Image (cartoon, rainbow, N blue to C red):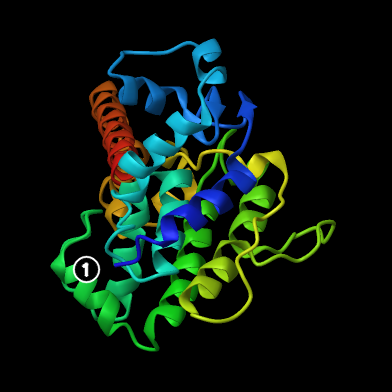
Amino acid sequence: MARETLSVALDLMFGHEGGYSNAKTDSGGPTKYGITHKTLAAHRGLKSVTAAQVKAMTLAEAIAIYQKSYWTQSGGDLLPAGLDYAAFDFGVNSGPVTAIKKLQDVLAAANVYKGKIDGHIGEQTLAAVDAYPGGVRMLIIAYCDERMKYLRSLGGATGFGPNGRGWTIRVTGKDPLKKWKDQPGVVGNALRLTATKGPAPIAVEAPAEASAKADTKSTGLPEILKKPEAWGPLGGLLSAGGAIAAGSGPLQWALAIALVAGVLVGVWYFVRRVRSEA
């Protein structure tokens, strides 16, 4: 549908995904051209690759990986121009499945998508894109807003804390500290790509942390515990507290401790499930 966007998307991508990095705040580990060591190993059919092999990767191989493992899986050949780029950049940063799930979340919130939030582009998703109120331009804005909401939910040493400023500049083109000039960002460039005439997209200049992978495993615990499903196991803590307060013997205390342990295990499994499904 918009395959001509790919070359432009790649040019924009290397504006903030170029070069080799191996920062502690980047959950991707050794990375070059935005391709992590795990992605490179998978592309080559290997269990793993060394940092040196990542560093030696050519631009031609990186482009081949992007086209095969990110552009197509993020709906690049199916989504309208502009939205295809926004989904592609999101997919490179956070994984194609996450990028499409968040697109489906936006469509579902507008009551135009009734399907499963599964991270895969299908007829229902494409029909919902066409039916989105206000058209593709309004969808791009809402989608990038959803992406920022998702990024802000990521915690830990590789989450929004150390990388949030770079991610914000990458997506919105605005520096929260106002030290970098305003730029189109992903949202602005995506909107430019929807127009047949108008200003050309401009590669975003941003701090190095803009290229850090937004790892779904870094989903912040406070955000997870806001979910209604979390209150099932957490509610058990109230029962445990009541048992401890009412108990006066070793049996009551043992039961209460066992209950607390069970609740904590339940919360742990819930957190793992949320992070794996993000």
Relative to 181, does residue 212 appear above or below in the rendering? above
Along the line of sight, the residue nearer the viewer: 223 or 190: 190
Residue 278 appearing in the image: no
Find residue 10 and report its horizontal and vertical position in percent: 50, 49
Farthest right residue? 179
Write down the quadrant of residue 5 in the picture.
Answer: bottom left
Q: Is residue 61 left or right of residue 206?
A: left
Q: Quadrant of the N terminus?
A: bottom left
Find residue 15 and report its horizontal and vertical position in percent: 63, 47
Q: Is residue 176 left or right of residue 209?
A: right
Relative to 199, does residue 77 appear above or below in the rendering? above
Residue 54 appearing in the image: yes
Where does label 1 land, which residue? 125
Please report the residue visible at 61 percent of the width from the left and 69 percent of the height from the top: 200
Please report the residue visible at 67 percent of the width from the left and 57 percent of the height from the top: 169
Find residue 83 and report its horizontal and vertical position in percent: 41, 68
Amino acid beneath label 1: Thr
Find residue 263 and report its horizontal and vertical position in percent: 29, 37
Q: Is residue 55 left or right of residue 112?
A: right
Relative to 242, does residue 47 appear above or below in the rendering? above
Q: How many marks?
A: 1
Along the line of sight, the residue nearer the viewer: 276 or 165: 165
Along the line of sight, the residue nearer the viewer: 254 or 166: 166
Number of residues whose C-alpha sits closer than 10 Å to that of mark 1, classed few (under 14), some (14–19) or many (20 or more): many
Please report the residue visible at 81 percent of the width from the left and 57 percent of the height from the top: 180
Farthest bottom residue? 134
Q: Secondary structure at mark 1?
A: helix
Relative to 256, does residue 73 appear above or below in the rendering? below
Please report the residue visible at 14 percent of the width from the left and 68 percent of the height from the top: 123
Q: Is residue 263 left or right of residue 8?
A: left
